[in-house]
Every structure is written in structure tokens, then in C-alpha cells.
Amino acid sequence: MDELQSNPNIHESLENPTGPTLAIINYKSERCLSVTSGPAAKALTTTDGGSTDDPTNHWVLENPAYDGDANREFRTIRNMASRDLLGHADGEVILLPSEAATDHSVQWRIIPTTNLAGVFYIANSQSGAYLEEPESGTLTAAVPTKVDPINLIESEGPYSWKFVTLKAASGNITPIWDTKRKDAERAMRFLIGQWIESKMKKNGRPPGRMLTVSRAEAEENGFDMGVTNGNVRIDLQGYFTRGKGKKAIVFANVQGQVDDKTVWHVNIQTEVVWGVKTIQKAMTNSMEKVCTVELSQ
């Protein structure tokens, strides 16, 4: 699943108003984090990695802070089929309703591994425990005792997870002027102007929101308040690798979003200093020409 954009089965089938829809895949087993369905009580499990078209395998990382505070350390992890939140309490992984988003038991730190690009640990903010996939593939009691991430190594794959974007944006870009959100284009150009990254790191920040419009910024610039609360935003959708071994190149998949629509899409080769203006120009070109833009050497 390294070549994300070439997999025809990877797509976004559910409305996603708050952030990128992802498959959360265990590094060791290549199985997707999922929610069981049926008459029995809902529970967490993992399923074959090829079943990314199943909505029970779709997750979204959300920011529990008000108005998209992108610097907030913790994220909630919501299943897009059940709408429940991933939590940890009394030594077990649990599912809690949306109303529990401010509870620390459903807030998680996404920690980059030191030796594997695009691979992360998922640590609960309340217990400090790290999400693990047991060999059985059942996560009803899968979070172990707190583990020091410094001592985790590549062989300890059950603790390591990949976030794979389910939205193949190439050919799936909506012209921003066709969205129904008032002042969307003005607000997006404002956000592009706020971009400050000159390069993307392959072991950098986890997928999620990068930039949103605050209420104060909307008021100052005369934007409609509908562009706030993450309705117009820049998301890091995830990472993908092209090539293998020493020739492998990691790209960051960055997208401009208006509600549940992708309005521009830029793949940025990591560990290359492109400069702020070059990246901003790529974003603007993608939006204006309604096409995917790639920055690669």
C-alpha cells in the first residue's frame, strides 16, 4: 500500500467535514484498525489491509481544541462508520460516543518513530499506554502497560501504525468556485499565504489539520464566519513512499479542503528545502488549474 495514488481501491466514500479520512494500518501485520458490526456489541478489531473500501476501516483524526488549534498536542480518533471515538479505560480499548471528545480517555498523542518514515506510535493522553495489535487481531484489551517509546524498535511492529489516506485526490479535485461555501476562495488564498513550511520532514507531524481560519481572522479580513471551524482548511492527508530501499522517496500529501471537498492537492517530496514561496505557488497553481501538483527532484 506504499503507492497510495496508484491503488484504485483507495477512495473516500463518506462525508468528512473535519479532516482527512484515513486507514490506520499496523506496521507489522498490515491489517487495518476496524470496528466490528452486527447484532453484538461494537468492538475494535483489525481486518485485512486490502479492505480499505469498508467504512468500518475509515477513521478521522480530529482536534478536540476549539476552532482548530493546530498546535494542540492531542487528537481524537473517530470511526467514520459508527461515529464512535477510540478510547482507553480500565486497561481496555473502548469506543465512546461523540459527546466524550473532551474526555482525556479518548485523546491520543501521535508520535513519529525515530527509524521509520511515516510510521507512528499512538499513545493515550490519560493512561500513557500505547496502542498495540495483539496476534489475535482483537483489540478489546489491546493497550499494554505504558511503554517507553525510546526503547521501541522496528521489530516491535505491534505498537507501530501507518496512517494511509483514503482519498485519492488526483482526478477528484473540485473547483473551489463550485463549492457552496461563501468566501471559500478568499479564505483559502489567505491560508496559503499563512503557510510557513519551507520543507516537509519524512518523520514530521502526523496527518491532520495544518491551517484553519479562526473567528478573529475571519472578522479581520471580512470573511463570512462559515469559513471558520475547519470548514476551509489545509490538511496533511498522510505520507506515501515511491520506490524501495535506498531509492525510496517519501512524499507528503497536502490538500486544501472546503467542507468535504478537495479543492487543491500537492504532493511534496520530503527532506527537500523547496522554500515557502515555491510550496505556496504549487498550492495556488493546483487550485487555479484544478489539478494535482507534485514537487519532486
Image: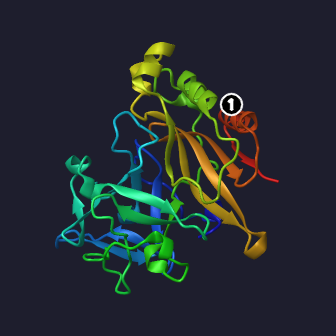
* Image position of 254 (left or right of 146): right
* Image position of 31 (left or right of 119): left
| Above or below: residue 123 compared with residue 29 | above
| Front residue of 84 and 73 | 73
Q: Is residue 1 visible?
A: yes
* Residue under label 1: 288
Which quadrant does the N terminus fall into?
bottom right
The outermost residue toward the right is: 297
Residue 194 falls in image quadrant: top right
User: Badge 1, how many Cα within 10 Å: few under 14, some, many 20+?
Assistant: some
| Above or below: residue 126 compared with residue 161 | above
Q: Is residue 82 visible?
A: no
| Front residue of 135 and 48 | 135
| Front residue of 12 and 148 | 148
* Image position of 127 (left or right of 117): left
Which quadrant does the C terminus fall into?
bottom right
Q: How is the image coloured?
A: rainbow
Q: Residue at x 49, y 79 (%)?
A: 157
The number of numbered discs placed on residues in the rendered structure image is 1
| Above or below: residue 277 compared with residue 118 | above
Element type at mark 1: helix
Spot occupied by residue 31 in the image (x, y as percentages of width and height): 45, 76
Q: Residue at x 59, y 55 (%)?
A: 204
Q: Residue at x 39, y 70 (%)?
A: 33
**For the residue marked with disc 1, what is the amino acid?**
Glu
Spot occupied by residue 255 in the image (x, y as percentages of width and height): 58, 43
Spot occupied by residue 207 in the image (x, y as percentages of width and height): 51, 53
Spot occupied by residue 150 in the image (x, y as percentages of width and height): 50, 71
Q: Residue at x 70, y 41 (%)?
A: 198
| Front residue of 17 and 173 | 17
